[in-house]
Image (cartoon, rainbow, N blue to C red):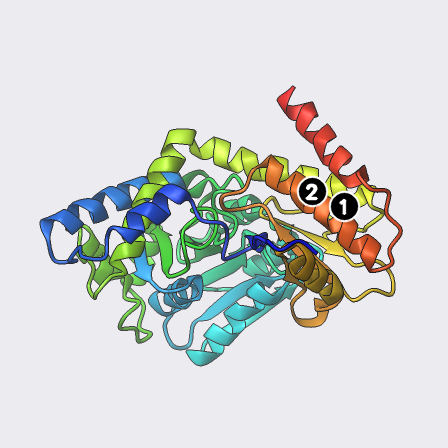
Amino acid sequence: MPGIIKERLFTPGPTPLLMEAQARTLTAANVHHRTEAFRKIMSETLSLLKYYYDTPNDVLIFASSGTGAMEGSVSNLLSPGERMLVGTAGKFGERWFGIAEAYGIEAVKVESPYGRPVNIEAMKQKLASEGPYRAVFIQATETSTAVMNDVRALGEAVKNYPETALVVDGITGLGTSDLRVNEWGLDILIGGSQKAVMIPPGLAFVSVSEKAWGLIAKSRLPHFYFDFSKERKNQAKGETAYTPATTLVIGLHAALEYIRKIGRENLIANAALLAEAARAAAQALGLKLFAESSPANAATAVCAPAGMDSGAIVKELRTRFGAVIANGQGSMKGQIFRLAHLGYYDMPDLFAFFAALEVSLLKLGHKVELGSSVRAAQDVYLRHAG
């Protein structure tokens, strides 16, 4: 075994960090949040977030994980006695039910099996026949299964209900897929810092439509820290209601400047290319893709070879090559492994990963033609890049 093994993240979060953002963060420890210097950075960052989201809507920042913003979207929209409709097809979709239970809100479920997208027609039927619902909740990308949901179709349906907001968890969807906030009627869209924006965990983002602000004004659920209206007033002045994660905001500013420089559409195209190449590479090894339809750009979920625990693949890659990937979650643990395409990734990273995967599978007893998956990924690259 070689003496040097460099650890590389291929997980759906945290993701590899942008070097410019790391450097900016390290030099920002002494910036105070109640100064004009920070207010300027905060205001510019919020403006850059609107570019990243491609929306003129308000975009708020919270010092939390994405789950904090998920909770905030429930507590800011709902009132006691009101109901919410949830489309779920994996572990992160199921999280909405835990949040609803904590607030005593009835959550009506439309559930699809793991590996398939949420049935949007079934959600439309629930809206038409079993309403009213104050809000509808869904994931743009269900990261636990690497499936993309049709939020466009759902948004078009929810537009017909003026007293119902559509809330989309775009934590891994933002920066990896086309999400048209205003055109599709995405009233609240949630993001997170440890994903496509390439900085460490600790920040959540929330875009809020005018329709959603009207419904928020009617909400009667309790909330204190995750008070969207309070933050809207403060962040309009370049401040936050409570102490912000100043270094992360400064790192986010650098990352968003980089995204604006390369172009939001090119960031999305990069994830799409990596995902297409990964799917082709996995299939070249005789491996089955877990997402039966509508595979996501943010990550690829791959079934382990018959009789092999996916945890063994995760362990072999990390021990032998320092390559960190994600096992399956919940009932899928031991059955699938997940490779991410969001964060500071490029095609050479993907080529290297599949070369390492080939060796790892070979060592675990799976028959592999060395170079086959790398060749498949290269073919996809050449088909798009010329």
Between the residue at mark 1 and the residue at mark 2, the CA separation in whole angstroms equals: 6 Å
Percent x, y for residue 48?
Answer: 31, 40
Q: Is residue 364 above or below residue 282?
A: below
Residue located at (36% from left, 54% from top): 206
- As helix, strand or loop, the secondary structure at mark 2 comes to helix
The answer to whether mark 1 and mark 2 are in CB contact below 8 A is: yes
Q: Nearer the viewer, residue 87 or 385?
A: 385
Q: Amino acid at mark 1?
A: Ala
Q: Quadrant of residue 72?
A: bottom left
Can residue 159 be seen here? The reply is yes
Label 1 environment density (alpha carbons within 10 Å; few <14, some 14–19, many ≥20)? many
x, y percent for residue 142? 59, 56
* Residue found farthest to the front: 3
Q: Which residue is mark 1?
A: 282
Q: Secondary structure at mark 1?
A: helix
Label 2 Cα crowd, 10 Å radius (few <14 / some 14-19 / many 20+): many
Whole-percent x and y of residue 89?
A: 64, 61
Question: Amino acid under label 2?
Answer: Ala
The residue at 62%/23% (across/down) is: 385
Residue 342: image x %, image y %? 53, 46
In front: 83, or 137?
Answer: 137
Q: Quadrant of the N terminus?
A: bottom right
Q: Residue furthest right?
A: 367
Q: Circle 2 sits on which residue?
A: 278
